[in-house]
Image: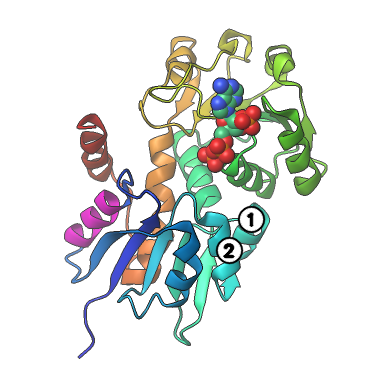
């Protein structure tokens, strides 16, 4: 008899990860005999750990900071999104025992955006993305795959934005960080992928009132849930999309691979995760 499937989140550190709350909720909700844990793995050990995942008793895993790029190199096969984003956040062993890797961040961001602002694309000829780190790569991939015509990419360190613009090609134009306010009137979607506005970080300074009245504002920061950027957007009557939805949705494909059921992102799940965020 085979033992119940087990998955985990692998990070260094890993304590802060909310993934066990999300997957633990679904395992209980669907009455699945399985488990989801945490593994603190040092950067020098990640490739070995992934290559011996089944010996550790796992059918798959989420991979978080700082291992996402190393995971792309360690998997046997990576999907299109993972290759384009340059990072893997979800792995699973397929029927042949091959380690498959995906990046579900873009999927999570786009599904959440679609859910909270179903007509976002009709309002969005031009999008502005703030930041040029790993999260920005996922958002750029998602927006371009959805057909956004033009993305203005702006980052404090302009060279990093230029590198991303070269990789992602013609829809992306780099905008100097100090010029972002003047481009806002043309933008139907503003996405913050920087750490600005996160608890303990400086706020993001941007002229939200300069956005069109139909604009959508998304933040990938979810601590706090209502960032100063989202609060300013709501105050102006704009559609605000918080970062927690992305976190919940990006977990869906992994759970399906490991445990065989495609789980729903519900208000009840969200409330459970919010309660853990509020508990600190
Ligand atoms: P992630 O992988 O989550 O995207 P990251 O790679 O550390 O994280 O990227 C953080 C982003 O927040 C970067 O775009 C960073 O700008 P730089 O590339 O100039 O470092 C941005 N960021 C962090 N602190 C910032 C600050 N004080 N002002 C402006 N941008 C900031």
Give the farthest residue toward the front: 44
Decide which of 14, 140 is in the foreground and name it: 14
Q: Residues within 10 Å of mark 1 (few under 14, many from 20)?
A: some
For residue 30, above or below residue 204 = below
**What label sits on residue 217 in the rendered view?**
none
Quadrant assignment for ligand 1: top right
Magenta segment: 20-29
Looking at the image, which is closer to me, 78 or 156?
156
Quadrant (top left, top right, bottom left, bottom right) of the C terminus: top left
Q: CA distance from mark 1 to mark 2?
A: 7 Å
Q: Quadrant of residue 81?
A: bottom right
In percent of width and height, residue 197 lies at: 46, 21
Whether 163 is drawn above or below 22: the answer is above
Q: Can residue 109 be seen?
A: yes
Query: Residue under circle 1?
Result: 86
Local SS, label 1: loop
Q: Which mark is residue 72?
A: 2
Q: Indicate the position of residue 191 as horizontal and vertical percent values.
A: 57, 30
Q: Compared to 167, does 148 lie above or below?
A: above
Q: SS at mark 2?
A: helix
Q: Is residue 40 left or right of residue 89?
A: left
Q: Is residue 138 left or right of residue 158?
A: left
* Mark 2 CB near ligand 1 (8 Å cut): no
Relative to 141, is 201 on the left or the right? left
The secondary structure that most of the magenta stretch takes on is: helix
Return the disc, 1 or 2, that comes first in the chain's sequence. 2
The residue sitting at 39% across, 22% down in the picture is 200
In the rendered image, residue 206, in percent from the top left (x then y), is placed at 59, 13
Taking the spot 53% from the left edge, 25% from the top edge, the residue there is 217
Quarter of the N terminus within the rendering? bottom left
State yes or no: discs 1 and 2 in contact (Cβ < 8 Å).
yes
């Amino acid at each position: 008899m085979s033992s119940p499937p087990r998955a985990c989140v692998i990070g260094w550190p890993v304590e802060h990860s909310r993934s066990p709350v999300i997957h633990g909720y679904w395992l209980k909700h669907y009455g699945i005999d399985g488990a989801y844990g945490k593994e603190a793995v040092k950067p020098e050990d990640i490739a070995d750990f992934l290559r011996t995942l089944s010996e550790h008793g796992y059918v798959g895993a989420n991979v978080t900071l700082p291992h996402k790029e190393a995971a792309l190199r360690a998997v046997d096969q990576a999907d299109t999104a993972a290759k384009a984003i340059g990072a893997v956040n979800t792995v699973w062993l397929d029927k042949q025992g091959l380690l498959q890797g995906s990046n579900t961040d873009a999927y999570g961001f786009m599904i959440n955006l679609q859910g909270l602002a179903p007509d976002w694309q009709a309002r969005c000829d031009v999008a502005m993305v703030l930041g040029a780190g790993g999260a920005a790569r996922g958002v750029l991939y998602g927006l371009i795959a959805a057909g956004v015509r033009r993305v203005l990419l702006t980052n404090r360190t302009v060279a990093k934005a230029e590198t991303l613009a070269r990789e992602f090609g013609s829809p992306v134009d780099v905008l100097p960080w100090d010029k972002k306010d003047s481009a806002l009137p043309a933008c139907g979607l503003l996405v913050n992928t920087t750490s600005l506005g996160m608890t303990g970080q400086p706020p993001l300074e941007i002229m939200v009132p300069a956005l069109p009245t139909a604009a959508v504002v998304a933040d990938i920061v979810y601590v706090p849930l209502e960032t100063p950027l989202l609060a300013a957007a709501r105050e102006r009557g704009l559609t605000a999309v918080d970062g927690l939805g992305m976190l919940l949705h990006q977990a869906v494909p992994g759970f399906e691979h490991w445990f065989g059921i495609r789980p729903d992102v519900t208000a009840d799940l969200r409330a459970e995760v919010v309660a853990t965020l509020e508990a600190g």
